[in-house]
Amino acid sequence: MIKLVYSICMVMFIVGCTAQNEEPSQSDLELAATKTYMKINDDIREIADECRGQGSVIVNPLKALKCTSVCSFDPKECRILPEITINDFEKLACVEAVGQPGWVCDYKYSVSSQSEFLLKMFKNLYGTENLVQGRFFKDESGQWIMAP
């Protein structure tokens, strides 16, 4: 009986370790990268909230430019906002990270938006390359995240 319990524990340990070392799938990578990249949409919503609170006259020229760009689809109420969308995400290859947890993966993607301002903002933050590399690992809940 003790041997059986020991054997079951060893199998569970081996399966658990193997599961931790599994390479992320394309959908795992896409979801994790999208969470990171789509934070820019949250930033746009925050700018819009600030703009709504300013009324129609904004004294600061930089803020006026941001508000004009962000609220261009709905200048009166600033409720209809542009968004960045990730298209054509493709996992190319992954190798286990050395000296750090997770996997280093090459992938490619493209982005689109109704707003040239938002596309420029995205490119300033993440660069213009669409063939990139990132490190991905699981958090405590088992969800894949992309390292900053």
Image (spheres, rainbow, N blue to C red):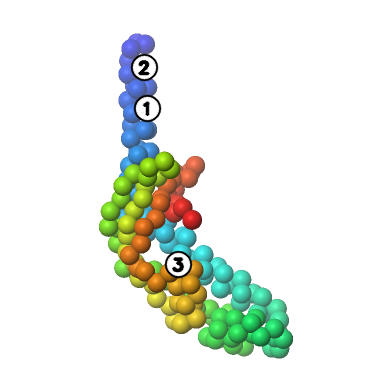
Task: Give the distance between the C-alpha atoms of the residues marked 1 and 2, in whole angstroms.
Answer: 12 Å
Name the foreground residue: 70 vs 123.
Answer: 123
Seen in the image, is 82 located left or right of residue 6?
A: right
Which amino acid type is marked by label 1? Phe
Q: Position of residue 48 (x, y in %)?
A: 61, 77
Q: Is residue 116 above or below residue 37?
A: below
Quadrant, the N terminus: top left
Count neighbours of disc 3 (C-alpha within 10 A) and say few if under 14, some if 14 to 19, many if 20 or more. few
Q: Is residue 32 above or below residue 69?
A: above
Seen in the image, is 8 located left or right of residue 49?
A: left
Q: Earlier in the sequence, mark 1 or mark 2?
A: 2
Q: Earlier in the sequence, mark 3 or mark 1?
A: 1
Give the labeled residue for mark 3: 126
Question: Which secondary structure, mark 1?
Answer: helix
- Give the numbered dot on residue 5: 2
Q: Position of residue 26 (x, y in %)?
A: 31, 55
Which amino acid type is marked by label 2? Val
- Give the numbered dot on residue 13: 1
- Residue at 49% over, 42% down: 140
Task: Give the distance between the C-alpha atoms of the residues marked 3 and 1, in whole angstroms.
Answer: 39 Å
Q: Is residue 13 above or below residue 78?
A: above
- Residue at 32% over, 18% down: 7
Task: Give the distance between the C-alpha atoms of the residues marked 3 and 2, in whole angstroms.
Answer: 51 Å
Seen in the image, is 35 located left or right of residue 6?
A: right
